[in-house]
Image: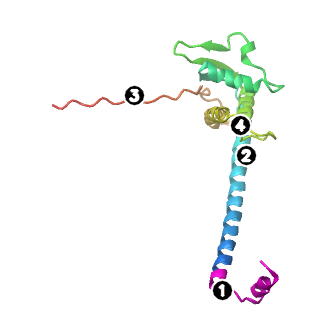
Amino acid sequence: MGLADWIRIARGDLTPEEIAERDERARARRTRAAQAGADKVAQGQEYALYQQRLHRAAGISTVTLVCHIDTWRFIDRYADERNTWQSPTHTEGRITARGDGLTEVLLSGPQVVMVLIVMADECGRGTRIRIAAPFIGDRVIAARIYEAVGAIVDGVDPDAPEGAPVPPIVIDDRITAPTQPTPDR
């Protein structure tokens, strides 16, 4: 756009097409700004939920994680990168193989906090200043674990008087059994 065009714009000598183009660009800028604001609000809400989950998890005495041994190894491998991680694999009787292909891992509240932090970081929802896990499969697995742990922790009420124990965290999605067609009579 040259000087002559700027002078025409300043004087208001625009064609209807130029006015429409200018207005469309202004609408696009407003839309981008509104979306950026909405994204910032959503990020703030996600961070507040993350902080609330950490606070609630810290008060859990114990909870059982039920998952495949490979899922447990995934968690343990990523968590082991942290200096403060104390793996239950080093404590007798905290990991039990079940007969159905699943494993039960008894976690303490501090371990649940660490699982939430590590999985949130690896799937890109945490606060760690680095890119999430480089492999998309790891990011997806971490997100699934974060959501499963978070769903149980969300049900914890730190202000409740003595109540029911924390239900197990189960990471074992199943396909529902197909329904059998009813025979015609």
Q: CA distance from mark 3 to mark 1?
A: 66 Å
Q: Quadrant of residue 105?
A: top right
Which residue in the structure is indicated by mark 1?
Answer: 15
Distance from disc 2 to disc 3, alpha carbons, whole Å, reads 38 Å
Q: Is residue 177 left or right of residue 15?
A: left
Observer-side mark, 2 or 3, equals: 3
Residue receiving disc 2 = 47
Element at badge 1?
loop
The rendered magenta stretch, by its main secondary structure, is classed as helix
**In 3D space, how far apart are the residues under numbered discs 3 and 4 (Cα atoms)?**
32 Å
The amino acid type found where label 2 is placed reads: Tyr
Instruction: Look at the image and give the residue range highlighted in magenta.
Output: 1-19
Badge 3: residue crowd in 10 Å (few <14, some 14–19, many ≥20): few
Mark 3 or mark 4: which comes first in sequence? Answer: 4
Closer to the eye: label 3 or 1: 1
- Circle 3: element type: loop
User: Of 185 and 5, which appears nearest the observer?
Assistant: 5
Residue 4 belongs to magenta span: yes
In the displayed structure, 43 sits above or below 51; it is below
Q: CA distance from mark 2 to mark 4?
A: 10 Å
Residue 120 badge: 4
The residue mark sitting in front, 1 or 2, is 1
Q: Which residue type carries mark 4?
A: Ala
Rendered residue at 76%/90% (across/down): 11
Q: Is residue 165 visible?
A: yes
Q: Nearer the viewer, mark 2 or mark 4?
A: 4
> Which tag, 2 or 3, sits closer to the chain's start?
2
Residue contact between numbered discs 2 and 3, judged by CB atoms under 8 Å:
no
Residue position marked by numbered label 3 in the rendering = 177
C-alpha gap between disc 1 and disc 2: 48 Å
Q: Are marks 1 and 2 in contact (CB under 8 Å)?
A: no
Instruction: Return the residue nearer the eye: 155 or 162.
Output: 155
